[in-house]
Image (cartoon, coloured by chain):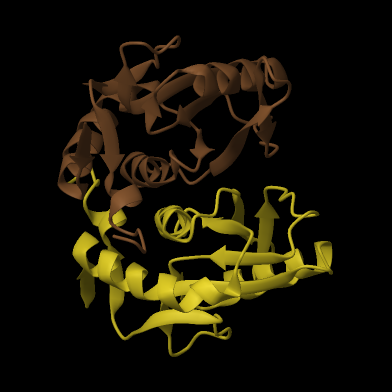
Chain colours: A yellow, B brown
Amino acid sequence: MKQYYSYENFRNDTQKLILEVKNFNAGAIVSVARGGFTLAHCLAEGLDIRDVQSIRTELYDATCKRKELSLFGACSLADVSRVLVVDDIADSGETLAYVMQHLQKNFPEAVFKSSTLFIKKTSIYEPDFWINEADAWIEFFWEKDFSLAG
Amino acid sequence: MKQYYSYENFRNDTQKLILEVKNFNAGAIVSVARGGFTLAHCLAEGLDIRDVQSIRTELYDATCKRKELSLFGACSLADVSRVLVVDDIADSGETLAYVMQHLQKNFPEAVFKSSTLFIKKTSIYEPDFWINEADAWIEFFWEKDFSLAG
């Protein structure tokens, strides 16, 4: 079952998330492409964070038996002490777990926290800040409202 | 005078922009931070482009007399032949002009086109695709709807 997540839902949840995340005092945001982009933008505006960067993951069929996650996009965070990593949903949780580990390894002196709108019960990773538990397949407005198939 | 630009306005205009940009067949999107992030995300969904990267500019007071624009964020576009660069508005036009020149210089074999929702009459640069001419100060929903003061 798909559950449509409208802009109005998003606005209300993102306003709540801003209040939760505010005290972390992040100096930069890293957005996970594509899913995290709209949330990262609106969090950055609400929290008045100008330094917004992005990172991209791809899942490859490395062998017949397992898939491998690859990361693209070099972040420049050497001068930042607190970084908020943003994605829309912790679904399997693998992407966010991998991104957090990668960033922490590359910038060992910075503190990284993660935030999403949704978490699935089955996620292997729990973001530091999240708003909703997802039971159904969430169909975000950015996925539904711009589909050429309509 | 400020003119509020709601999500409904954005949805309608972005749907139009998708139809205009579609035939360019971009293989990747470069989003100008922060302003281009939500549009880049929704264009990427509508156009089914998975490769979404970002670039960030800062205006420095280099001397008392003039300001200098600096670019942050390395894009990896070596394997992409057609790239869509996305920002919300061509205001002075300096950011987009600079970003386009920088990307073209770094990836001389790729074709770059730019798209925005708005262009100001006074912009020194005209994006390849745009929807509205801006007379007033546009207050985008991502600026207004998440303001803690608001």
Residue A65 visible from this viewpoint: no
- Residue A105: image quadrant is bottom right
Q: Is A144 left or right of A28, judged from the image as shown?
A: left
How many numbered marks, from 0 up?
A: 0
- Residue A108: image quadrant is bottom right
- Residue B114 position in % (x across, y down): 44, 22
- Residue A99 position in % (x across, y down): 66, 66
The relative height of residue B4 versus residue A104 in the rendered view (above or below) is above
Name the residue nearer the viewer: B74 or A24.
Answer: A24
Q: Is B89 left or right of A70, judged from the image as shown?
A: left
Name the residue nearer the viewer: B114 or B59.
Answer: B59
The relative height of residue B73 versus residue B63 in the rendered view (above or below) is below
**For the point 78% across and 54% down, which residue is it?**
A79
Residue lying furthest bottom: A121
**For the point 59% across and 29% down, which residue is it?**
B80
Q: Quadrant of the N terminus of chain A?
A: bottom left
**For the point 20% across and 41% down, which residue is it?**
B4
**For the point 23% across and 60% down, which residue is it?**
A7
Q: Is B101 left or right of A77, judged from the image as shown?
A: left
